[in-house]
Amino acid sequence: MNDSYEPVIVGFLCNWCSYRAADLAGTSRLHYAPNMRPIRVMCSARVEPQFVLKALREGADGVLIAGCHPGECHYVDGNIKALRRYELLKRMLRQLGIEEERVQLVWAAASEGNVLADAVNRMTEQLRRLGPLRWRETVLGGDAQPEERAGEMMAKEV
Amino acid sequence: MNEERIGVYVCHCGSNIAGTVAVEEVAQWAAKLPNVVVSRDYKFMCSSLGQELVEKDIKELGLTRVVVAACSPHMHERTFRATCERAGLNPFLFEMANIRELDSWATDDRAAATQKAKAMVSAAVRRVVYHQPLQLLPVKINPNTLIVGGGVAGITAALEIANAGYHVYLVEREPSIGGHMAQLDKTFPTLDCSACILTPKMVDVAQNKNITLLSWSQVEAVEGYVGNFTVTVRKKARYVNEEKCTGCGICIEKCPKKVIDEVFEAGLGYRKAIYRPFPQAVPKYPVIDTSNCIFFQRGKCKACQMFCPTDAIDFEQQDQILKLEVGNIILAIGYDTFDPRRIPQYGYGRLANVFTSLEFERMVNAAGPTGGRIVLRDGVTTPKSVAIIHCVGSRDKNYNEHCSRICCMYSLKFSHLLHERLPDAQVYEFYIDIRATAKRYEEFYHRVLEEGTRFIRGRVAEVTDAARMPGEEGKLIVQYEDTLIGKQRRLPVDMVILSLGMEARRDSREVAQIFGLGCEYNGFFIERHPKLDPVNTMTEGIQIAGACQGPMAIPEAVAQGAAAAARVLSLISQGTVMMEPVRAHIDADKCSGCRICNNLCPYNAIVFHEDRKVSEVITALCQGCGACVAACPSAAITGAHFTDEQVMAQIEGMLWDVQPQFAMTSMETR
Ligand SMILES: Cc1cc2nc3c(=O)[nH]c(=O)nc-3n(C[C@H](O)[C@H](O)[C@H](O)COP(=O)(O)OP(=O)(O)OC[C@H]3O[C@@H](n4cnc5c(N)ncnc54)[C@H](O)[C@@H]3O)c2cc1C
Ligand code: SF4
Ligand code: SF4
Ligand code: FES
């Protein structure tokens, strides 16, 4: 790892609050780390563990899930469902040896562009410190195939 | 591999995007992505020339999918869907990449912004392949409307809609409509008599054949969606038969039980156990407050029944549960005032002569408990000096950060009324800033300045009765910092009025839950757009009006009531609405009948067929949140326009430039 390492975060933003928060951050020209790549979903409750694992496997260093504040979900309590699923997911990630900071859940109301921007900045900073996710070492242990190792070497050099 | 032919269009948005993202580079790069047959950049994609470019390509190059990388889909998704449709392409075969709000405006790092834009474009290109043609869902609009809250905002909305010829159910939880405005004496800045301008409107409501007034009632549940809501209303027992009652008021006169009226008289006056909040109440029928009625408590009395000339008192009456079918809903539940007991150092409830602003409104009102006389709590002594404290519970991080907007103005109004009624009294206003921003407000402020009120800039630390200096005995001492001269000071006065801020209704979150709305952090309902859509909400078919949206004075509450009515009328006159087809669907062959999804749906849109042991989504009820889609262990549920395939492809596209950590995951190999 060298100084030029920049983590890549996949962000799942709910259509009604957090995506609008991100829109507002932009409209208010709040500058924040460009490391988060946004994917819009209708509600944080749509985010399946599968999506998170897929993003990590595809090379993301972290995943941010952002929804409305509790009590403010456009679909009544979708964010609470997301929270419960997130707790489960965290346990699973721990067992896989993936650091907790890599998957984060935050609440941002449509009027809170700054909250979303801060969350992205904070997470980017934490991931910079953690360095790249070495899925194969942490998750697959020594079982990786030789050709996969080659990929791994490349990943390390990023 | 598939056969799709994608067109990619990268917008400069003048310099809004092009200033930070290398748009030409992104467009050239995108041309090499799989399935892309044409990739262009253009100054303003949303202009008619930009749109014609897309239309021409669809027709001439046979595009089957379109990606526009420009601003937020909340801005222009509809625009470009329409573009596709005009060229004969299903509008849902389009995808937007938001490289402005989420990229070029959020950083000034050109290299990083360009890289991120490429990620978003590649994600959109991969996603759009999996889009399916969808149709908007037409929904018929029931022309009846429910309005909740009969304050001035709700009354205005009800009359607008009823006068246009459509039916309105107006649900009010108090025995009478009128809201806070009915409690006020004069209204700033014109000083018209509040009741004189409000009661004619209340009578119009009572007499309008298109309005069903349900007072002393509450909404318990709402089901359905825009155009077709089913609302459950509890009409509480009044113990007065509305068919027989003539509103003569003899029962009220004869009732032996007096109770403090905490609601209408703000605790300053009394009412009976059978009561109407005020003589001009609409409807005119009284209600029996069972927790204070001697008959309900001790089984004896029935004075009201004995004297009622039309035999209208009915102790057996029961609550009624009504089911209303409506197409639109307007919420106008108003506000609550800040509870001054939360600031104990101001002494409300402990020091007799500290009054709230609402108490003062009742006191100066000729129809109020003192007959309009301004007196101390003993009921006889006239105050010689009065201190009005602004911003109580407003503009303070410990209570409410927001400015309540109306307290400066009603405080000035109080000064004026004090000078008018007690010409010899000394009046002091303790303010932080004077906010007199609407039409005629500043002029009113100057008028009050000339009348001799002393304005002291500073926050009051404490109101106390502990005298320390001669002249302070028997007085209330206001301890404050005069921020203009930077000194701590004490001022003895006879009466203190606390100008309470406006808050959301204490139960606004519960109400929001019933109607499926969002609240701000402070409990006020969230409008769809703070500038362009102030009365609409994120829930189709539900509008908000008046002070439940935020602190406001009567003219704005009226304007919002009328605006919400206009919204509803425009929907009614369309007859049908087109709804987004983002809906869940269960594949009966894959469903294992586990029923996990059944309880997850916030709209009870999923039914279980006992006979076939499978679940089914009722499309008309589903709002498309995707909670069930994410939870189904058999992957039997698809969420249209947000399918697993679409999101997975999007994830891959977003990560085009990083090394995958695992082989065999790309969509191509699936
Ligand atoms: C002391 C004081 C003085 C003021 N003086 C002035 C003035 O001089 N000029 C001026 O322009 N403004 C003044 N105002 C502001 C004014 O009161 C408001 O702007 C106005 O009343 C807002 O009207 P509204 O209809 O939105 O709400 P409200 O008047 O609060 O009406 C809401 C109605 O909804 C009902 N309701 C609440 N919850 C439910 C529910 N769950 N179900 C059914 N019904 C429900 C309530 O009972 C009420 O009838 C003053 C305010 C105060 C506190
Ligand atoms: S969760 Fe899936 S499998 Fe279970 S009942 Fe619902 S649709 Fe059927
Ligand atoms: S997507 Fe599923 S859970 Fe959400 S509203 Fe539709 S049926 Fe209910
Ligand atoms: S809509 Fe934002 S979390 Fe549900």
Image: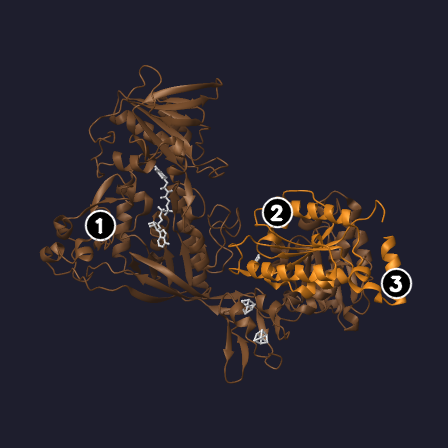
Are the residues under marks 2 and 1 on the same chain? Answer: no
Q: Mark 2 near ligand 4 (CB under 8 Å)? A: no
Q: Position of residue B519 (x, y in %)?
A: 49, 51
The residue to which callout 2 is attached is A24
Task: Kindly identify which numbered label has been placed on residue B276.
Answer: 1
Nearer-the-camera pick, B214 or B342: B342
Image quarter of the C terminus of chain B: bottom right
Q: Position of residue A12 (x, y in %)?
A: 66, 57
The residue to which callout 3 is attached is A149
Q: Is residue B376 visible?
A: yes
Relative vertical location of residue B280 with respect to residue B373 in this rendering, above or below:
below
Side of B651 relative to A22 (left or right) = right
**Circle 1 chain:** B
Colour displayed for chain A in the image of the structure: orange
The mark that comes first in sequence, 2 or 3, is: 2
Q: Amino acid at mark 3?
A: Arg
Way the structure is coloured:
by chain
Residue under the point 38% across and 61% down = B220
Q: Amino acid at mark 2?
A: Leu
Label 2 or label 1, whichever lies nearer to me, is 1
**Ligand 1 quadrant in view:** top left
Q: Position of residue B652 (x, y in %)?
A: 76, 63
